[in-house]
Amino acid sequence: MTGTADTAGQESRVTDFSDDEVIIGLEIHCQLDTLTKLFCGCSTDYRDDGPNTHVCPICLGLPGSLPRVNRKAIEYALRVAKALNCTIVEESEFARKNYFYPDLNKGFQITQYDRPLAVKGYLDIEGDDGEKRVRITRVHVEEDPGRLVHKGGADRAKYTLVDYNRAGIPLIEIVTEPDIRSPKEARKFLNKLRATLEYLGVFDSEKEGSLRVDANISIQPRGWFDREGKGKADRGRAEVKNISSYKGVEKALTFEVTRQKNALRRGQRLGTETRHFVETRGVTTSSRSKEMEQEYRYFPEPDLRPLRVCAWADEIVLPELPDARRARFLTQYGCSPIHARTLTGDLRVAEFYEQVAGIDPVLVATWVADTLLGELNYRDMSISRVSPDWFRELLFLVHKGNVTDKGGIEVLRSLLDQIRESGSCETPGACVGRLGLRVLERTAETGSEDDPVVNAAREVIAEQPQAVADFAAGKKEAFNFLVGQVMKKTRGRAKPADVNQVLSGILGKEG
Amino acid sequence: MVSEKDVAHIAELADIGIEKEELAEFTGRFNEILDYFDILDQVEQGARGGTDLVNIFRDDIVEDSLPADEVLANTREKEDGFFRAPRVM
Amino acid sequence: MATLTFPQDDRYNAFITMLDKAETGPGKLSGIGIAIKDNISTRGIQTTCASRILEGYLPPYDAHVVKLVKKAGAGIVGKTNMDEFGMGTTTENSAFGPTKNPADTSRVPGGSSGGSAAAVASGMVRMALGTDTGGSIRCPAAFCGIVGHKPTYGRVSRYGLVAYANSLEQIGPMARTVSDISLLMEVLTGYDPSDSTSVNCPYAHIPDPDIRGLKIGVPEEYFGEGVDPRVASVVWDGISLLERKGADIITCRMPSMAYALAAYYVTCTSEASSNLARFDGVRYGPPADTRQTWHESFQERRRDGFGTEVKRRIMLGTFALSSGYYGKYYAKAQAARQQVRNDFLRLFREVDVIAGPTMPTVAFRIGEKTDPLSMYLSDILTVPANLAGIPAISVPCGTSEGLPVGLQIMGPHFRDERVIDVAYAFEQGVSR
């Protein structure tokens, strides 16, 4: 029996969710890739350095210090706002968000509240049911707090260690409307957003901790949300805070969908609660942090002047963004739509592809989108570790036929493993030689004694009389089987086309 | 008018310890002052004053950070370059 | 380079920290020993804001104004006593004991820059830096019988000033003569990129006592019922002197005065409640107890480290900013503030400066004022200048009951020169 929750106080079970939908809204924080922090001149390049080595009176929150706004951070934020099709607010201002926590050394965070930088934008993504538009509520700029380290783990630590290197790093906060309808869509949104930010040159997704996501998720009767959320059945929602990886977002939300559905099946009433994602266990747990109960007493930051940046935003020329690049790849390189989407989904991949595409764009597209990315993913390696030069060399060998596709893959794997081990690799040519993968060259005449393909074919025919007979009897699969045996015998070094030709020749003659 | 309970709640919000003995007096003074503030109710919400000073920025150029010994100089609660703080529950 | 030494006898408790010697160099302030209010950061010299919560704090940097006075050759004599974090009108709210008024040691010197005023008035130093959020330079100047100037908001950098109320406060000069005020203004003013509210408007001016034809507005509200008639009388005598020197006296009205004090206290307590949240004992001040939890330690530190008045203002500000009350208090206070600004703009279309008493009374006895609200009410004549950001000076203009009385002159934004000229004219007129 399908149930919808009644007015408050009554529990009813939901057992069939076909009339319900998952409602997801995201709040994304990304570190902007400026040289200095948002309000002071400390370098943002802190990750390899010791704690508290990138701090000054301002980001350390010393009494008497005053913030100074980094122009570049605002420029980057405006680029993002424009790329997300937002309206730039005519006069925006900074505000103080007041709460007490050891990583927030002033006792307040300088952020934006009533009058953010930009509002009402959108990002088009490939949704579950085709292209869809996710609306952006607002985009604003704020500072990152410091970092807490708990010796011996968060549960057992006697005290907290604090490092303020991260305090003051510029963040852009992007808030979506609850337009996302599944954990998978959420992942796709984040991927598109990440790619867009990288294309804009304002974000480096490879920096650890550079992106954090808070997700709001609930399960509501279909259409409830479109009625401005004022339907009868508000079943409450969960806010999962501080998810710090893209994969984590999909996992966390998938877990939440299951958890919420189970709760609804048991007739439990879901309130509004804050939860925390435990990456290692793939679960969300209830959060009882004091911060949740506090109110923030926002007021305009008196130490900073307002921003009037509409005219500046108008002058900003955006670089080519993912969608435009994808369209260009289709026309310029003749890629398939799927390949074009994959190749442009990451700036580094797109740039890599364009550097090596010259040999044969379609061949290279397959090699990069399908083969290379797969092998890199398997090894948890970034494409930035692959030199376009040797990859081009490898593909040239494949393109020329000096090595088969299969052989080429073997070489690629070997080179990637070498890089992973030692940071460098031999040349593709050397690797081909070392692994003995050089394609067997046919001699001019077929049928000659020295032709290795012919010899291999003859051996196979001799070894597989049943298959030969089957082929003669008209079974086409038997031919493929024999081809496979010849490939095996030549250890992949024969060109499939040659094997086909030779076998046909011999069997045709004899059959 | 605020009650002692309200004042205690504000003290919680502000994370300031007020002793129970002080609460009564604090509340009395608080109310006197808040009564005085009521005169603001008569003020009309006018237009915001314009500011001439807007868009004050700094260039994205790295400046020296504080040397580590100066950063940690004002506390003895430090460990391996970190500040030591009481743990958050 | 010369070394200044000075007597360490601090009978008025004007100083929290005294150096035994100071280096001076060449420059406009060469050879001059200067006292600095203890809420202004001085590198390597204890800066406490007269609070236990900052006891022992040695800033690793100098406030911008400290750099400027050092560059001008002054020697820093020490850090002066004040009301804790600038919150007070008498310098009785100090964790280091009250400062005594050199004019009468049973009386307060005014606040919150009472230590600086006493140091100057007693002759210990020739000049001092104070800060003025709601009258904290002008009040002690009036009570101690010296000159104190609050510059136009933005003319003097706040970088290094431990914030109490960011949108209201300014560092300013305190001295025995208007000429010295003017000299110090030359050193202190000018654009500072490290303060985003700093304005590029350096002061370079020789005070000019010619005020013939100058129009001086005197608002009725400045001589209303809250003002002691004896003080009013002395100040009117002073204004009459200005008239004899050629100025026109024009009475006027400032209706926004009715809201000014409430607007001031809502604004400053709100900003203070946020500014004082950083004293968690992790980076400076008496250390947090790491055996406790964060919350316990933070709460205890604030209970023990802040005085009663500071706690009260933090709580008032927390309340004023909390949800449900923001519209009633903070938002209304800003609207009232705009009305005060508009009143001044209107008046300054008709007059060149505004004059009146600095304080409604002479200095109270130490321990006399125990009721916070009545203490707040004594700021009524000084807060309007802070709300509007306009320049205002207090110059000694006689005595009442044997105690100094201050004449306050206020001018339009960025007309500190004009305000100082009128004060100079008065000072010169008196000495003749």
Image (spheres, helix red, strand yellow):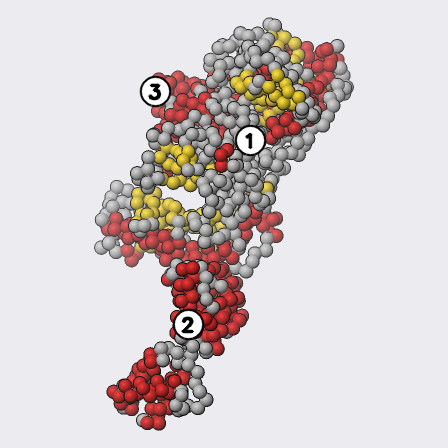
Q: Residue at x 38, y 85 (%)?
A: A453
In this view, C327 is above or below C380:
below
What amino acid is found at the position of numbered circle 1 in the picture? Tyr
Quickly name the residue at label 2: A434
Residue A23 seen from this side: no
Q: Rounded to the nearest whole Å, what is the CA distance between mark 2 and mark 1? A: 64 Å
Q: Quick one: quadrant of the C terminus of chain A? A: bottom left
Give residue A32's position: percent from left, percent from top: 50, 48
Give residue B33's position: percent from left, percent from top: 46, 20
Closer to viewer: mark 2 or mark 3: 2
Give the SS element for disc 2: helix
Image-based side of A415 in relation to C345, left or right: left
Closer to viewer: mark 2 or mark 1: 2
Q: Are marks 2 and 3 on the same chain?
A: no
Q: Residue at x 37, y 18 (%)?
A: B22
Q: Rounded to the nearest whole Å, what is the CA distance between mark 1 and mark 3? A: 40 Å
What amino acid is found at the position of numbered circle 2 in the picture? Arg
Quickly name the residue at label 1: C61
Give the SS element for disc 3: helix
Return the residue nearer the eye: C175 or C270: C175
Quickly name the residue at label 3: B20
Q: Are marks 2 and 1 on the same chain?
A: no
- Mark 2 belongs to chain: A
What residue occupies the far top of the structure in this picture?
C401
In this view, C355 is above or below C270:
above
Give the SS element for disc 1: loop
Image-based side of B86 in relation to B42, left or right: left
- Mark 1 belongs to chain: C
